[in-house]
Image (cartoon, helix red, strand yellow):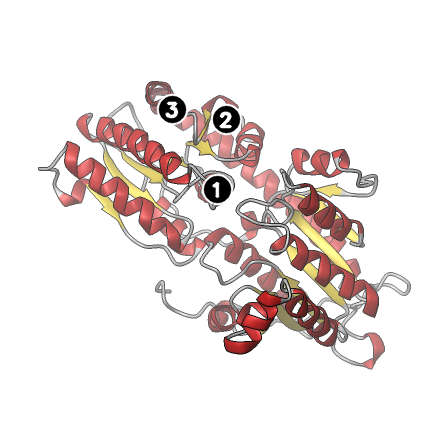
């Protein structure tokens, strides 16, 4: 499948599983109420973030395989893009964002309160026939780059609407925290409290929600749902010593936790400068580099890094450093399958590298990267994106090169365990749907 192809054609529709035992069918059982169950999938999908869309794809694949009679609708950031990619009905998360002209001016005049009332009315209108609302993965319960009246309020409103019409809510392998703004924390905690099923992609997410007052006694921990995606043909990386390798370097247009805050440009410039120094080290030592991305906006970082490396090595042949776009996690995994080692910032760059058994170094912007790496036995190979030291990164890379086959075997074994764990979560979800 090419990058621009629709993913909708990839989903088969086999026969549904046998009906659950009496008393075990959830509110959204396909045979309930004498009609097809309606399942709403909620999240920031279609906005160019490959990890988010990959999480949605994994859930759609599961539902179409195990509950093919259910009616699916996606409540998302970019309805047209999600419909194009996945072939499902969509609704916007927020209608007030589309106000133009005089209505938009009036909304601003009255402190955006009319727009929020429109959003609430439309939410109740569109959620009233849903039996189940699923949030499939993503870091839905953090306020990275968000103000309280953005996504924190949106998820609260949709969860409140679902409870008002009697729909169940399932938060599935989600990431949580940090939520730094007090109002955002209240809104997101209240939304989580309304859920009937909650699972987190790591221990720190569950512990964070406990720290903000949520009762987690019946909650679960299961791996990120992107580990369920089908991997491409994956030739093993080259074996041996420190011969010429291809290194995947995942870049991100990172401007700090709140990208709209002051100082963001300086953070981005420092990140690119240090990353370029590391890339030049790789190139000078005979290795090739493939740049990896996880969001469409990362092209800004790619261009800046290529320019910085070009200034340092103006005669570098173009074949030594490859930068190709990725439009899905499948594209990303295809690119990763051609490299031997990965150094990445974005969480789902790390997830895809590990899924393919690639020894990985994380330059993360949040603890979620570190926790995943620790679960893989790679905790010593992490640094923070704003504080990483290039010399330490070079030493970490040298460590991986010397023992990369041992790392690879360890990662592959752990990924198999993750996939088994996600199969167990599927059994939980089938009692709801």
Q: Residue 99: which disc?
A: none
Label 3–label 2 contact, CB within 8 A: no
Q: x%, y% of residue 187? A: 72, 50
In front: label 1 or label 2: 1
Question: Of label 1 and label 2, which has the lower sequence position?
Answer: 1
Q: Is residue 113 left or right of residue 266?
A: right
Can residue 411 be seen by looking at this rendering? yes
Question: Of label 1 and label 3, which has the lower sequence position?
Answer: 1
Q: Residues within 10 Å of mark 3 (few under 14, many from 20)?
A: some
Task: Give the residue furthest to the bottom.
Answer: 34
Q: Which is nearer the eye, 284 or 23?
A: 284
Label 1–label 2 contact, CB within 8 A: no
Mark 3 = which residue?
400
Question: Of label 3 and label 2, which has the lower sequence position?
Answer: 2
Q: Which is nearer the eye, 312 or 22?
A: 312
Disc 1 to disc 3, C-alpha distance: 36 Å
Mark 1 = which residue?
261
Query: Which secondary structure, mark 1?
Result: loop
Task: Give the residue furthest to the right.
Answer: 23
Residue at 67% x, 38% y: name it. Answer: 205
Mark 2 = which residue?
378
Q: Is residue 169 left or right of residue 33?
A: left
State the image quarter where residue 277 is shown. Answer: top left
Query: Which secondary structure, mark 3?
Result: helix
Task: Give the residue furthest to the left.
Answer: 315
State the image quarter where residue 163 is shown. Answer: bottom right
């Amino acid at each position: 499948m090419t990058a621009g192809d629709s993913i909708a054609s990839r989903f088969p529709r086999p026969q549904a599983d046998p009906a659950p035992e009496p008393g075990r069918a959830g509110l959204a059982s396909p045979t309930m109420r004498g009609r097809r169950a309606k399942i709403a999938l909620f999240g920031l999908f279609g906005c160019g973030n490959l990890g988010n869309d990959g999480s949605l794809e994994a859930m759609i694949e599961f539902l179409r395989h195990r509950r093919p009679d259910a009616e699916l609708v996606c409540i998302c950031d970019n309805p047209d893009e999600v419909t194009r990619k996945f072939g499902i009905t969509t609704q916007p998360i927020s209608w007030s964002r589309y106000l133009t002209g005089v209505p938009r001016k009036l909304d601003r005049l009255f402190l955006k309160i009319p727009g929020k009332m429109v959003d609430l009315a439309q939410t109740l209108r569109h959620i009233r026939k849903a039996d189940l609302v699923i949030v499939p993965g993503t870091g839905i319960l953090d306020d990275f780059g968000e103000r309280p009246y953005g996504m924190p309020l949106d998820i609260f409103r949709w969860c409140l609407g679902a409870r008002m019409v009697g729909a169940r809510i399932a938060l599935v392998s989600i990431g949580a925290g940090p939520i730094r703004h007090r109002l955002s924390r209240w809104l997101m905690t209240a939304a989580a409290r309304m859920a009937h099923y909650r699972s987190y992609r790591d221990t720190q997410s569950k512990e964070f929600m406990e720290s903000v007052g949520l009762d987690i006694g019946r909650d679960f921990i299961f791996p990120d749902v992107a580990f369920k995606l089908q991997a491409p043909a994956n030739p093993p990386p080259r074996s041996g010593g420190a011969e010429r390798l291809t290194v995947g370097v995942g870049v991100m247009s990172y401007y700090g936790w709140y990208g709209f805050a002051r100082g963001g440009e300086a953070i981005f410039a420092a990140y690119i400068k240090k990353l370029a120094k590391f890339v030049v080290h790789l190139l000078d030592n005979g290795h090739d580099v493939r740049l990896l991305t996880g969001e469409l906006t990362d092209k800004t970082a790619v261009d800046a890094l290529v320019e910085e490396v070009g200034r340092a090595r103006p005669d570098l042949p173009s074949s030594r450093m490859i930068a190709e776009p990725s439009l899905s996690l499948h594209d990303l995994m295809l690119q990763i399958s051609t490299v031997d080692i990965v150094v990445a910032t974005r969480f789902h760059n790390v997830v895809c590298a590990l899924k393919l058994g690639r020894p990985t170094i994380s330059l993360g912007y949040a603890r979620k990267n570190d926790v995943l790496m620790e679960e893989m036995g790679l905790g010593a190979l992490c640094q923070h994106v704003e504080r990483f030291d290039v010399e330490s990164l070079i030493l970490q890379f040298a460590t991986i090169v010397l023992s990369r086959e041992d790392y690879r075997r360890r990662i592959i074994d752990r990924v198999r365990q993750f996939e088994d764990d996600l199969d167990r979560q599927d059994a939980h979800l089938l009692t709801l749907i």
